[in-house]
Image (cartoon, helix red, strand yellow):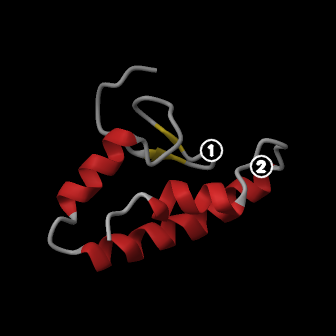
């Protein structure tokens, strides 16, 4: 994969379409912080909804390397500045 194009999620794997990193990748995080610069609450609500969807999708994949709840929290919520 290349890093060209928008860093959007690919379901059900929840990998970045552009760089194949776990989404939200670093570029997606930076983009989200810019897009929601004046609405941190909105960003948190959006990320909570994506966390919910990701948990359901990743659970159905049945892989042994599924992220733990702690890892998912850090990936979707824990990086957002307070």
Mark 1 → mark 2, Cα distance in angstroms: 8 Å
**Where residue 24 appears, x then y in whole percent?**
44, 48
12 and 70: which is toward the camera? 70
63 horizontally vs 30: left or right: right
Image quarter in which the C terminus is found: bottom left
Few, some or many C-alpha atoms within 10 Å of disc 2 (few <14, some 14-19, many ≥20)? few
User: What x and y, as percent, mark residue 37?
Assistant: 17, 65
Circle on res. 13? 1
| Rendered image quadrant of residue 34 | bottom left
Q: Which residue is mark 2?
A: 61
**Callout 1: SS:** loop
Which residue sits at x=37%, y=62%?
80
SS for callout 2: helix
- Which residue is painted at 82% across and 44% down in the image? 63
Residue 2 picture quarter = top left
11 vs 64, left or right, is left
Identified at 40% across, 77% down, the residue is: 45
Are the residues at dot 1 and dot 2 in contact (C-beta closer than 8 Å)? yes
Q: Earlier in the sequence, mark 1 or mark 2?
A: 1
Residue that appears at 49% across and 72% down: 49
């Amino acid at each position: 994969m290349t890093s060209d194009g928008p860093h959007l999620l690919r379901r059900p794997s929840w990998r970045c379409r552009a760089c194949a990193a776990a989404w939200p990748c670093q570029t997606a995080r930076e983009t989200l912080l810019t897009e929601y610069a004046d609405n941190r609450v909105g960003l948190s609500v959006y990320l909570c909804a994506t966390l919910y969807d990701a948990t359901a999708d990743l659970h159905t994949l049945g892989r042994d390397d599924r992220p733990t709840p702690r890892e998912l929290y850090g990936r979707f919520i824990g990086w957002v500045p307070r």
